[in-house]
Each structure stands twice: as C-alpha cells, then as structure tokens.
C-alpha cells in the first residue's frame, strides 16, 4: 500500500464514521449498519498492509478508536431513548387494555 494513499483513506474512513453518527442520531440503524460494514472493509484494507510507518498506523488507529467511542456514546443514548419510548408504549397499551376491559363490562 502506498503511504501517500493512507491520509486519503483515513479521511474517507472518518467521513463514513461521521455519516454513521448522523444516521444514528436520526435513528436510521439500517443505513448506519450498511455504512459500518463499508467502514470496516476500508479499515481492514487500510491496516492489512503493515509494512508502512508504524507511528502513522498507531495514530490512525487511535483516531478511529476515539471516533468509535463517540459512536458508542451515541448508540447508548439511542438505546436509552428507545427504552423510554418502549416503556411509554407499554404503559399506553396497558392503559388501553384496562379501558377496553372497563368498556366491555358496561
């Protein structure tokens, strides 16, 4: 792999990471998942040739890990939001069932 191509590849990987985070913010997990597969393939291609500059590779990995930490935070927030929405939906369903039971008795 050409060392000159690495910065361009890293930027492409970063951009995909940004798109993934935006899709997670919009709760479009299908698109985020597709982008994650694409990003993974590019990361594997980038780091499969380890004969390059070790310091540059290490710095690139650290950058990607930092971005992944941010993504994990977003996913955690989304999970919490979905859990709250699910709890609200369940409470609403219980209330509707209780109302129907009362209505059926009349």
Image: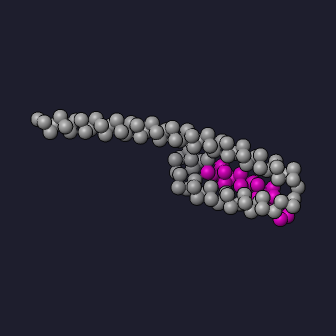
Q: Is residue 69 magenta?
A: no
Q: Residue at x 87, y 61 (%)?
A: 51
Residue 41 horizontal/vertical position (percent): 68, 61
Q: Residue at x 41, y 40 (%)?
A: 86
The relative height of residue 73 versus residue 14 in the rendered view (above or below) is: above
The outermost residue toward the bottom is 1
The C terminus, quarter of image: top left
Q: Which residues are magenta?
A: 1-20
User: Which of these two is toward me, 26 or 72?
Assistant: 72
The N terminus, quarter of image: bottom right
In which image quadrant can residue 70 be found?
top right
Tell me how many marks there are: 0
Residue 66 horizontal/vertical position (percent): 72, 43
The overriding secondary structure of the stretch rendered in magenta is helix
Q: What colour scheme governs how the chains and residues are painted in the rendered image of this protein?
A: one colour
Q: Residue at x 53, y 46 (%)?
A: 26
User: Which of these two is toward me, 25 or 46?
Assistant: 46
Q: Is residue 90 left or right of residue 16?
A: left
Q: Is residue 18 magenta?
A: yes
In which image quadrant can residue 99 be found?
top left
Q: Residue at x 83, y 60 (%)?
A: 50
Residue 74 horizontal/vertical position (percent): 59, 41
Q: Is residue 27 visible?
A: yes
Residue 98 horizontal/vertical position (percent): 24, 35
Q: Is residue 4 visible?
A: no
């Amino acid at each position: 792999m050409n060392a000159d191509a690495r910065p361009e590849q890293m930027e492409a990987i970063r951009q995909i990471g940004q798109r993934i985070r935006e899709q997670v913010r919009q709760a479009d997990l299908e698109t985020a998942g597709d982008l994650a597969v694409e990003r993974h393939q590019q990361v594997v291609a980038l780091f499969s040739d380890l004969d390059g500059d070790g310091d540059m590779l290490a710095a690139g990995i650290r950058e990607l890990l930092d971005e992944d930490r941010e993504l994990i935070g977003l996913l955690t927030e989304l999970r919490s939001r979905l859990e709250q929405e699910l709890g609200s939906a369940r409470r609403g369903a219980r209330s509707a069932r209780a109302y129907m039971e009362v209505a059926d008795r009349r």
